[in-house]
Image (cartoon, rainbow, N blue to C red):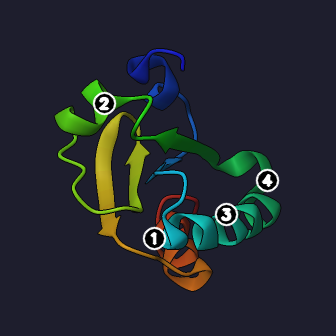
Amino acid sequence: MEKFGDIINVSTPVLLCFYSEGIENSLHMNAVLREVVSIFKSHVKVVKVDIDKNKELSKALKISTIPTIIIFNKQSLIWRGEGFQDTEVLMKELNKFLQ
Protein backbone atom coordinates (compact mmCIF):
# COMPACT_ATOMS: atom_id res chain seq x y z
CA MET A 1 0.00 0.00 0.00
CA GLU A 2 1.26 3.46 -0.82
CA LYS A 3 1.98 5.92 1.97
CA PHE A 4 -1.10 7.08 3.84
CA GLY A 5 -0.25 10.76 3.37
CA ASP A 6 -0.09 10.23 -0.39
CA ILE A 7 -3.47 8.49 -0.40
CA ILE A 8 -5.31 11.36 1.28
CA ASN A 9 -3.32 14.17 -0.36
CA VAL A 10 -5.61 14.52 -3.37
CA SER A 11 -8.08 17.16 -4.54
CA THR A 12 -11.12 14.88 -4.19
CA PRO A 13 -12.70 13.36 -1.07
CA VAL A 14 -11.16 10.00 -0.11
CA LEU A 15 -13.31 7.20 1.26
CA LEU A 16 -11.33 4.57 3.15
CA CYS A 17 -13.01 1.25 3.92
CA PHE A 18 -11.22 -0.74 6.61
CA TYR A 19 -12.11 -4.41 6.26
CA SER A 20 -10.98 -7.94 7.00
CA GLU A 21 -11.31 -10.99 4.79
CA GLY A 22 -13.95 -13.40 6.04
CA ILE A 23 -16.00 -10.82 7.97
CA GLU A 24 -19.48 -10.90 6.48
CA ASN A 25 -20.18 -7.16 6.76
CA SER A 26 -16.89 -6.51 4.97
CA LEU A 27 -18.13 -8.61 2.06
CA HIS A 28 -21.43 -6.70 1.95
CA MET A 29 -19.54 -3.39 1.79
CA ASN A 30 -17.98 -4.44 -1.55
CA ALA A 31 -21.30 -3.96 -3.37
CA VAL A 32 -21.81 -0.57 -1.69
CA LEU A 33 -18.29 0.56 -2.62
CA ARG A 34 -18.79 -0.51 -6.25
CA GLU A 35 -22.00 1.53 -6.32
CA VAL A 36 -20.26 4.58 -4.82
CA VAL A 37 -17.50 4.32 -7.42
CA SER A 38 -20.02 4.03 -10.26
CA ILE A 39 -22.01 7.05 -9.01
CA PHE A 40 -19.13 9.40 -8.19
CA LYS A 41 -16.58 8.11 -10.72
CA SER A 42 -13.45 10.31 -10.57
CA HIS A 43 -14.96 12.76 -8.07
CA VAL A 44 -14.20 10.47 -5.11
CA LYS A 45 -11.25 8.22 -4.41
CA VAL A 46 -12.25 4.89 -2.81
CA VAL A 47 -9.59 2.79 -1.09
CA LYS A 48 -10.06 -0.54 0.66
CA VAL A 49 -7.65 -1.14 3.54
CA ASP A 50 -7.15 -4.69 4.84
CA ILE A 51 -6.58 -4.30 8.59
CA ASP A 52 -4.55 -7.52 8.72
CA LYS A 53 -2.07 -6.15 6.18
CA ASN A 54 -2.07 -2.57 7.54
CA LYS A 55 -1.91 -3.02 11.30
CA GLU A 56 0.00 0.20 12.04
CA LEU A 57 -2.47 2.39 10.15
CA SER A 58 -5.44 0.56 11.69
CA LYS A 59 -3.99 1.11 15.15
CA ALA A 60 -3.21 4.77 14.46
CA LEU A 61 -6.79 5.41 13.33
CA LYS A 62 -8.21 3.34 16.22
CA ILE A 63 -10.08 0.87 14.03
CA SER A 64 -11.97 -1.47 16.34
CA THR A 65 -15.07 -2.33 14.31
CA ILE A 66 -15.08 -3.93 10.88
CA PRO A 67 -15.96 -2.48 8.52
CA THR A 68 -15.11 1.11 9.38
CA ILE A 69 -15.54 3.84 6.78
CA ILE A 70 -13.53 7.05 7.09
CA ILE A 71 -13.86 9.97 4.70
CA PHE A 72 -11.06 12.50 4.32
CA ASN A 73 -11.30 15.78 2.45
CA LYS A 74 -8.28 18.03 1.97
CA GLN A 75 -6.31 15.73 4.29
CA SER A 76 -8.78 16.19 7.16
CA LEU A 77 -10.97 13.48 8.61
CA ILE A 78 -14.52 14.67 7.96
CA TRP A 79 -16.65 11.62 8.69
CA ARG A 80 -16.36 8.21 10.31
CA GLY A 81 -18.86 5.36 10.39
CA GLU A 82 -18.42 2.02 12.11
CA GLY A 83 -20.17 -1.09 10.90
CA PHE A 84 -22.04 -1.56 7.65
CA GLN A 85 -22.96 1.71 5.90
CA ASP A 86 -25.36 1.75 2.96
CA THR A 87 -24.96 3.70 -0.26
CA GLU A 88 -27.41 6.43 0.74
CA VAL A 89 -25.47 7.28 3.90
CA LEU A 90 -22.17 7.48 2.03
CA MET A 91 -23.68 9.51 -0.82
CA LYS A 92 -25.14 12.00 1.66
CA GLU A 93 -21.78 12.50 3.38
CA LEU A 94 -19.77 12.71 0.16
CA ASN A 95 -22.19 15.12 -1.51
CA LYS A 96 -21.52 17.66 1.25
CA PHE A 97 -18.02 18.12 -0.19
CA LEU A 98 -18.76 17.88 -3.88
CA GLN A 99 -21.09 20.85 -4.30
Measure the C-alpha gap from mark 3 to mark 4.
16 Å
Give residue 37's quadrant in the image.
bottom right
Disc 2 marks which amino acid? Lys
Do the residues bearing badges 3 and 1 touch, measured as CB atoms within 8 Å?
A: no
**Mark 3 or 4: the one toward you:** 3
The secondary element bearing badge 1 is classed as helix
First in sequence: mark 3 vs mark 4: 3
Q: Residue at x 59, y 68 (%)?
A: 29
Image height check: is 80 above or below 83? above
Question: Depth check: 81 or 9 in front?
Answer: 81
The location of residue 55, given as percent across then percent down, is 31, 30
First in sequence: mark 3 vs mark 1: 3
Q: Which residue is drawn at 40% across and 45% down?
A: 72
Residue denoted by label 2: 55
Q: Residue 93 carries which label?
A: 1
What is the crowding at mark 2: few (fewer than 14 residues within 10 Å), some, or many (at least 20)?
A: few
Measure the C-alpha gap from mark 4 to mark 2.
29 Å
First in sequence: mark 1 vs mark 2: 2
**Mark 4 or 2: the one toward you:** 2
What is the crowding at mark 4: few (fewer than 14 residues within 10 Å), some, or many (at least 20)?
A: few
Residue denoted by label 3: 30
**Mark 1 or 2: the one toward you:** 2
Image height check: is 22 above or below 39? above
Give residue 10's quadrant in the image.
top right
Image height check: is 29 above or below 45? below
Disc 3 marks which amino acid? Asn
Residue denoted by label 4: 41
Q: Which residue is drawn at 54% across and 20% down?
A: 1
